[in-house]
Image (tube, rainbow, N blue to C red):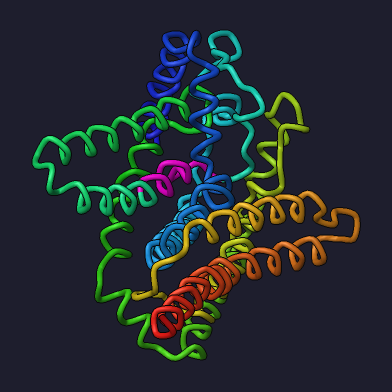
Amino acid sequence: MKLYGYLLKREIYQIIYVQDVFSQYEDFLAAVTKAFDPKVLFLTVIPVVAGLSTTLYSKLLLSVLLTEYANTIVKWILAEDRPFWWLNETKEFSSLNRPKIYQNELTCEPSPGNPSGHLMTSTTYLFVIFSVLEEYLAKYGRFARVSLRFVYYSTLFFISISRMYFGCHFLHQCIFGILLGILMSKVCLSHRLEKYIAKQSGKRRVGFVVLICLAMLSLYWAQKLLGIDPQWAVKMAFKWCEDPFYLKPTTTLVFSAIRLTGSLLALAVVGPIQKAKPLNVKLSIPMVMAMMAFEWIALDFTPRNFGVVVYFLYSFLLYFLFTYAYLRWVPALAAGQDIRASRSERTKSKSN
């Protein structure tokens, strides 16, 4: 434990160094950490893919959901501190030499720190997107492939710097998030896994989701039986965050589990889509944009004064319905428009 405390102490000085060197780029780093927030990715960037390709959206959704689930479970198991509260709780510093790290509204996340959810989810998300781009740009040779990989790793670097700058994560938590993200990407992009899930019946896929939920609940209650408060990170965040209004319930592990389960259940009901008809982008993109706007509005009207059960149930249903809509309704309407158009064209050609 002494070695572990010593390493975290050195990483605190790394954070202070990053905050000193990158202080003039704070707006840029804030934009990076906001853009690659798992919730923002899930509500904005990923749905846009649903308007471009149903198969790619299905693949991306499966990868991101399983990665976020893995991140939630590993966070609960490792139960590591975040820098902004470890610094104030540790005995590695005395009251005389305890440094102070900069924090703002992006710092105060009420969940364990390891692995970084931003890095783990973004690694998987970008891995899927860049794999598709690399395959598409293969005709342009090695330069295109090297350029894509440079952009990929540069993006992960800046996400890591942003998470350290705001005191959200230690360096090792960022690195571990990237490594686990790459591992999950390899697993989720395996054609065997996707084919296996697609071959299962809807009831069996729903059964898998139930098993995952039971595993999460077992982990939650096992901690309670061991005398560990599963919500300890929330209490630490409230204790050491400079402004409690910075804290958001949507960044807790419990809410993440609710959000992920709603979306994963929708994917289980529909099933991974390996083949789909091309979408009429002129129709599908406006449709997706309208649905995204409606989803944000619906989230703003989440009932917060009727108890935790109502709050979580509303959130669960919301994520289930919109994920189902992106998977089922968008391709049904957008691809159906193409079918109707082609049929009308054939009718006209015959009449002529």
Q: Which residue range is magenta in the image?
A: 112-123
Quarter-wise, where is residue 240 in the image? top right
Q: Residue at x 32, y 82 (%)?
A: 196
Say left or right for 342 vs 323: left
80 vs 165: above or below: below
Q: Quadrant of the C terminus?
A: bottom left
Q: Is residue 50 left or right of residue 232?
A: left
Horizontal arrangement in the rendering, residue 243 relative to residue 192 (left or right): right
> Is residue 22 rendered magenta in the image?
no
Asked if residue 164 lies left or right of residue 127, the reply is right
Question: Residue at the location (25% across, 72% down)?
Answer: 191
Q: Is residue 76 visible to the viewer in this orientation of the structure?
A: no
Quadrant of the drawing holding the N terminus: top left
Task: Give the image quarter of residue 86.
Answer: top right
Regarding residue 39, the answer to whether it shows in the image is yes
User: Relative to 63, is 328 above or below?
Assistant: below
Q: Is residue 282 above or below residue 213?
A: above
In the picture as drawn, the residue positioned furthest to the left comes out as 142
* Residue at the image point whose x is 55% and y is 80% from the top: 210
Residue drawn at 33 percent across, 43 percent down: 178
Residue 286 image offset from top left, x and y in percent: 59, 54
Q: Nearer the viewer, residue 55 or 75?
A: 55
Residue 334, image x and y in percent? 52, 68
Q: Nearer the viewer, residue 143 or 318?
A: 143
- Against 324, residue 77 (above or below) is above
